[in-house]
Amino acid sequence: MKIVDAQIHIWSQTVTPPTGLHRKVEKFTAEQALKEMDEAGVDAALIHPPYSWDPTSNQLALDAAQKYPDRFAVMGQFPLQDPESRNRIKGWRDQPGMMGLRWALLQPAEQKWLNDGLLDWVWPAAEKEGIPVATMGGIFPDKFREIAEAHPNLKMIVDHCGLNRHGQDEEAFIHLDKLVALAKLPNVAVKATGAPHYSTKGYPFQNIQDGLHRIFDAFGPKRFFWGTDITRMPCTYRQCVTFFTEELPWLKGRDLEDVMGRGLCEWIDWKLKFD
């Protein structure tokens, strides 16, 4: 079974410290990522450049994807405040290794852009170009739904299970009903990345398994993508893998293969070879 991680970060510098719980290291290179992936049995990974602490990370990710095309691809970004950015989206996927766009929009100032008109051009432009877009839609589920409904041909991805990023255990699932309702929109998928973070109970994170099952049942195996965000996980890379491959009794067979990589690659049109 080919295993593809739906989200990792690599960086070569830290202009500002890595955010949140990410490893406080000066750099985390493609080669370091490959070593950890090999040890964990992960075949490939989708790089999300951590632009907030390494402004050069978009090019770094592209360089890695071009050097290791069977191991890496990229969900890139550009500065949304820059008027010149409107010219960047056309032909975005012509860059070798570039699969789509991703902005976390974690900060309150960034979330204001969702309502003040700054981002109004992004969604139709990405829809026209056929570019998948990922964001932390669980933080603003109502606005996320509004965008997805208005642009039915725009493939959108909710990051990190769509859960409450400031909560753990039961508190992580306080917006679960709204997330599950998004599954009715066929252009919306969920990255089940960072799942171990949401449990304080340790491996195999039994107290979040039912919640993940409900998300899986809503979105199905073709729109529910395993991944890690490994540089901020509270467990080993291998445990991130086996949590899904060995500990979830409802995830087996073809469904498991889809969740662990095939579904993601089909969604973003990453042409990796699967058996």
Image: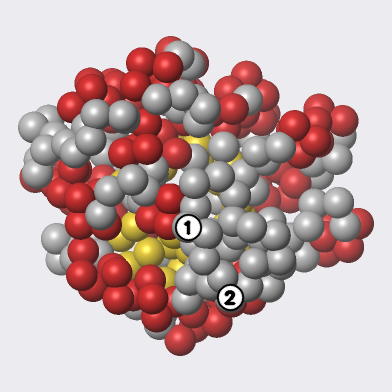
The residue at which mark 1 appears reads as 23
Residue at 18% x, 27% y is: 206
Q: Could you tell me which secondary element the residue under label 1 belongs to?
A: loop
In the image, 246 versus 259, the foreground residue is 246
Quarter that holds the C terminus: bottom left
**Horizontal relation, residue 214 to residue 99: left or right:** left
Mark 1 residue crowding within 10 angstroms, few (<14) / some (14–19) / many (20+): some
In the image, what residue occupies the spot 67% across and 24% down?
143
- Quarter where residue 169 is shown: top left
Residue 213: where, in percent of width, then height? Answer: 24, 25
Instruction: Count residues near mark 2 (Cα–Cα under 10 Å), then give few for <14, some for 14-19, many for 20+.
Output: some
Q: Earlier in the sequence, mark 2 or mark 1?
A: 2
Residue 254 is left or right of residue 218, and the answer is left
Q: Is residue 165 visible?
A: yes
Name the kind of residue labelled 2 in the image.
Answer: Ser
In the figure, is residue 101 to the left or right of 73? right
Using the image, determine if residue 192 lies above or below residue 264.
Answer: above
Residue 200 to residue 25: above or below: above
Q: Is residue 273 visible?
A: no
Relative height, residue 256 to residue 70 (above, below): above
Count the marks: 2
Residue 142 percent location from the top left of the image: 62, 19
Asked whether 88 or 47 is in front, the reply is 47
Q: Residue at x 58, y 42 (%)?
A: 135
Relative image position of residue 140 (x, y in whole percent): 63, 25
- In percent of width and height, residue 7 lies at 43, 55
Task: Look at the picture and state if 193 lies above or below 5.
Answer: above
Q: Element under label 2? A: loop
Q: Residue at x 50, y 31 (%)?
A: 165
* Spatial separation of the CA atoms under disc 2 and disc 1: 13 Å
What residue type is disc 1 on?
Answer: Arg
Q: Which residue is mark 2?
A: 12
